[in-house]
Structure formats: C-alpha cells, structure tokens
Amino acid sequence: MIGRIFITLTGLASLIIVLFVLVILANIAHHGLGTLSWEFISSAPAHGMTAGGIFPAIFGTILLVLLMTIAVIPLGVMTAVYLSEYAPKRSALVSLIRLAIQNLAGVPSIVFGLFGLGFFIQFAGVGLDKFFFNSQIVFGQPAIIWAALTLALLTLPTVVVSTEEAIRIIPDSHREVAYSLGATRLQVVREIIIPQAIGGILTGGILAVSRGAGEVAPILFTGAAYFLPALPTKLNDQFMELGYHVYVMATQSPDVEATKPILYGTVLVLLLLTFSLNFTAIWIRSRIRKKMRALR
Amino acid sequence: MKEKTVDIKNLSVKSASRLILKNISLKARRGALLAVIGPAGSGKTTLLKAANRMIEFEDGLESSGEINLNEKSIYGMDLSELRRKIGIVFSVPTPLPLTIYENLAFGPKLHGSVNREVLADKIERRLKAGYLWDEVKDRLAEPASNLSGGQQQRLCLARTLMLEPEILLLDEPTSGLDPVSTAKIEAALTEIKKDMAIIFVTNNVKQASRFSDETAFLLLGELIEYGTTHNIFTAPANKKTEDYITGRFG
C-alpha cells in the first residue's frame, strides 16, 4: 500500500515537471507566435520599445555568445589539460586550482557582473586606456568584449570539468604507446588527448553557450545597453541582448500593453535561439562521438 | 661491432620499498634474439622500460648503472630520438583509436615524415614483416579495433617497426594470443632479428627455448643465469635455473 502511494507520488512529481515545462512553452508560444514574423526578427525596436522588432538584440546575443566561446574554450581546455596531464598529481597546487574552480561555479551571477565591472572595466579597461590611448576612454567603459569575458569566467568551470571528465577516461596505455613511439608531451596532448576529449570539450561548450545566452546579471554592468541605434562593430562597442531586452521591456516600458506582444515574441526568440544553438552543438557532438566509437 | 647493440651494465632499479632490479648486466645485439625469462614479479618489464626510459613515467623509481645504445649512453640522448631507435611492443595489444593506416602512420608523423607514397610503401613492407599484410591490405581505412587480438598485436609490431628501430623490445607480446598468431609473431621476429637487436620478455619457457638465441633468467630482480639458449636449456649452471625451466616453480 505504502509502496503504491510512493510510486504514485514519484510519478506525480515527475509529471509536475513536464507539466510546468509544457505550460511555460505553451504560454510563450501562444502569446509570442502572433508577433513572430520576418519583420519582427529583422528590424530594430521603435517608439520606445512599443513597436518594431528585435534584430539588434538577436545580433548582440549571438556575437556575445560567440566571443564568450572563443574566450572560454581555449582557457578551459588548457586548464583541464594542465590539471590532468602536466600538473604533479596530488599536489597542493592542483587541489588549490580545483577548489578555485568549484568555488567559481558556486558564485552568484550578479557577483560576476560586479566583478566584471570592477576588474575588466575599471582595472583592465582603464589601465589599457592609460597606457595606450592617452587616458581617452576607449576600453574603460561597458563593452561587448568585457561582457563576453565576464560570461567566459562564469562558464569556465563547466568547460574545465567536462573536459577533464573526458580526459580522465582516456586509457593510460594510449599515452604510453605515443610516448614509446617517441612523442613529446606536446604531441601526446595534440595527437592523443585533444582528439579523444573532443566530445567532452563540445559538451562543455554546449553547456557554456546555453548558460551564457540566458544570463542577464553578468552583462548588466559590463556592456548591455537599453537601446542602441547602431549594431556593435568593434570590441569596445556596447550591445543589445535578448535577455536584457526582456528585462528592460518588462520593467521600464512606457506602455505596458503595447509592449506585451513584443515581450512575448522576444522571449520566444530567446528560447528558440538557445534551443537551436544547443541542438546544433548536440548534433555535431553526436556525429563526432559516432566516429570515435567506431574506432574504439 | 658497435652497430645496433644495447649494452646494459650494472643496472639497478629501486622503488621506495624494494629493489626491483639488482645489478643487471646484459647485452643484446643484431642477429641474436635475447629472451628474458622468469616468473611474474622478476623485474622483466622494468628492465625493458629502463632501456627506453619509459621507466621515468613511474613515480618514485630510481635507477642506477649504465645503458648504452651503440656504445653511447642513453641518458645523454634526446628522448624522442631514443624511443625511435629503441622500439617497444607491450603485452596487451594497444591499437590507438584510429584506422589501421593512421595507426601505422602515427609514428612517422611524430617524427615529421609524411610523404604519402613513401609512407604507403613503408606500411606495406612493415605489415609484411609483421605477417599481417595479406589480412589487412584491403582494410587499411578500417578502425584498428575491428581486428582480432592477434592481428592487433601484429599491427602494434608493425607500428613499432615503422620507425625502423635499431633495438626492439617485446614485453610478453604473445601472452594473450592464439597459437596461430603466436607462430606468426615468432616467425616475424626470426626474420626481423637480422636487422635489429631484439630483447624478448616471456614467461613461457618453451617459447624461449624454441626460437631465441640467448637466454637470461631473472628471479626476484636478480640475473641468475645468462648465456646461449642452447647452454641454458641443456646444461644450466644454476640449480634455480634448472628448477625453473623444468617447471618446478614459477
């Protein structure tokens, strides 16, 4: 009897999750699909966000995530390679790095935002301006590069951990064979470790991208703008972003009723964009995995 | 003759807790296949790993003594070059997760030679030397993992031969193989020894007597007896050797 109740409860709990996902998706799709059009996707906002489209925000989001990926993948992969291949095993240094990575993963995203403002803009940006631009403000202001780097920091643990997991399952015998054929350490990393860990690296990349595309807090102070007449073309330009755009429209619209359909449309686009980024990456990964499995 | 010889003098290897090899002196040269026999834990594998300095990957092992390749100390040599000249085949077949072709091309690519035609020609010759060519000549683009265990081991032998080593070390290469593959590897080695020195570790005494020219008997890290295979197997000087080769222990 108690067993049956328990089974029913666990089933119910799972069902609630599915239900909520469906309700959220259905609600957004219901209100947003009407707004969705080529016009909406390809034009800029007008009349204080009460009309027009969201193209600059889509463009900004993609560019932001792209820059973030370019920063986070090499940094994360190199960290993971260092930890698993180069660092002396069980040393205090490795424990310290691991601890730092774990703590980084637990830091609230708004703290990353503040850190980005303090470190990247006030320290690095202002420093650059001082040394290279004669104290003119070039990099010492909110910009897409700083926002992307802040997001890269936020998603770094994901990439490090999933790369490390992938490296861990590479048999030692593969390294031994490579060394016995005269490979240097660098060649072992390049020819054995990276090719075999590529699935894990991509998994980390996927998780980083979907997290990065949805975060608003880290870019709040570091580069996202309420409205811009032009698209960002330089690394030190500000940018519009879908998540931030949603926040702005939900809290600061002059005409709530007129903004509502646009708001729903924007959320729908944000979801679709994240999903399609995810699916593309998952598709690429599964193709690589299939190839790897055939060889194993 | 100082060509293609490896000369081990007074080699000792110790770990934190014990002496793995005690004062071993051995010499292998082109044309004579040296079999190293002895029960498990005698230090046979350690001996091989010392010779191409793979031992340095193992934490806490300390070695002393001299090892000379062609009368030059291996400790002064570039590691990559040393391992090209002293090749090794491990006891468990270890194809890399690549195609058969890529496995064979792996070594040459590490050392920078990738001319396709030269490579293809070399692959054919090495696969023939490893008695594998007829079985895989139409399957070079297949994953190496598709091969049987015995074929994989011959692939590993061919892969090591791709680098044209001067010394070939084999660590119980036939221990897990079927008799047919074992026979093919023995036949291959009998040919190959004309071109390079071979040290062959085995715990199969019959195998050592069957096709080696010289035999060294290791027991608990000590070199008990070392001489021509004929002498060791017909008139062992040491009682322990006699006990071991007649199967009284080990």
Image: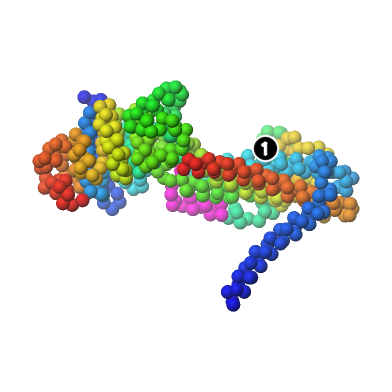
**Which chain is disc 1 placed on?**
A
Q: Which of B60/A187 is in front?
A: A187
Residue B202 seen anywhere in this rendered image of the structure: yes
- Residue A53 pos. (x, y %): 83, 43
The residue sitting at 38% across, 33% down in the picture is B135
Q: Quadrant of residue B166?
A: top left
Q: Identify the element where label 1 is drawn.
A: helix
The total of numbered circles placed on residues is: 1
**Image location of residue B5, percent across then percent down:** 25, 29
- Identified by mark 1, the residue type is Leu
Answer whether residue B47 is visible to the viewer in this image: no
Horizontal side, residue B31 vs residue A177: left or right: left
Q: Is residue A91 magenta?
A: yes
Which one is in front, A273 or A75? Answer: A273
Residue depicted at 44% across the width and 51% down the height: A91
Q: Is residue B84 magenta?
A: no
Q: Is residue A7 above or below residue B160?
A: below
Tell me the crowding category of disc 1: few under 14, some 14 to 19, or many 20 or more residues within 10 angstroms, Cα based. some
Mark 1 lies on residue: A128
Q: How would you classify the magenta stretch by its main secondary structure?
A: helix
x 85%, y 53%: residue: A260
In the image, the segment drawn in magenta is A85-102
Percent across and percent down for residue A258 are: 89, 52
Q: Which percent across, then down, holds residue A37?
A: 82, 43
How are the residues colored? rainbow
Quadrant for the N terminus of chain A, please: bottom right
Relative horizontal placement of residue A153, taking residue B15 as reference (left or right): right
Query: Of residues B137 and B216, which is closer to you in this image?
Result: B137
Point 10% across, 41% down: residue: B235
Viewer-side residue, B62 vs A6: A6
